[in-house]
Image: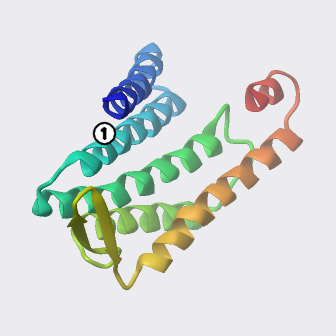
Amino acid sequence: MLFAFNSLVTAFANILIGIFVYTRNPKQSTNRLFFLLTLTLGLWIVTLYYYYVTNDVHLLLFLGRINFAFPTLTIYYLYRFIYEFPSTTIKLSKVLRFLITLLAYTMTFLAAFTPFIDKNEILLGTERIIEYGQMYNLWVAYFAGLPVFALSLLMLKIHNSKGISKKQLRY
């Protein structure tokens, strides 16, 4: 019961904060990116909750795959938010930004709709066993690598910024 309450409150709070920020200035890209970041994080929490409470084997596989797709998007939007907030002070090439975006959406598609990352989900009572697909290690590299890249950008932005921008980035 506490698990359900905590999961749903956390998801709702994330989505609500994102909506609040978005509605303050929907035309600003950082507000849109923050909304997408909190939305995908909230939806990931919701699908994780249902993943652990379902007893339907077919639904379990769907939720298992979606649970790889949402964090794939979440870390992509984290990278995008860090890149653009409070302003784009470090310029990445258009080709690199395009490749990161292409990789993120490709990995999301593969996670959600194919057995390449999550091959199968096995339900044994309350235990869930994941059979990983052929591209699972690539997904792990993406999932670990993009946040490290994003945090590196953040550190560079903090180092190179001054005044109010530096304070915004620190907090």
In the displayed orientation, state which residue is furthest to the bottom. 134
List x then y, in percent, for residue 54.
18, 49
Quick one: SS at disc 1?
helix
Relative to 52, is 39 above or below?
above
Within 10 Å of disc 1 (Cα), the crowding (few <14, some 14-19, many 20+) is: many
List x then y, in percent, for residue 48.
33, 47
List x then y, in percent, for residue 89.
74, 42
Name which residue lies at 34% across and 26% down.
Answer: 5
- Scheme of image coloration: rainbow
Relative to 45, is 97 above or below?
below
Name which residue lies at 67% across and 41% down.
Answer: 88
In screen coordinates, is 47 left or right of 26?
Answer: left
Image quarter for residue 78? top right
Image quarter for residue 171? top right
Name which residue lies at 82% across and 29% down.
Answer: 166
8 or 144, which lies in front?
8
Relative to 151, is 141 above or below?
below
Q: Is residue 21 visible to us here? A: yes
Q: Is residue 26 visible to us here? A: no
109 or 134, which lies in front?
134
List x then y, in percent, for residue 157.
79, 43
Name which residue lies at 34% across and 55% down.
Answer: 67
In screen coordinates, is 27 left or right of 141?
Answer: left
Looking at the rendered structure, the number of numbered marks drawn on it comes to 1
Quarter of the rendering occupied by the N terminus = top left
Disc 1 marks which amino acid?
Answer: Val
Image quarter for residue 104? bottom left
78 or 52, which lies in front?
52
In the displayed orientation, state which residue is furthest to the front. 125
Residue behind mark 1: 46
In screen coordinates, is 149 left or right of 18?
Answer: right
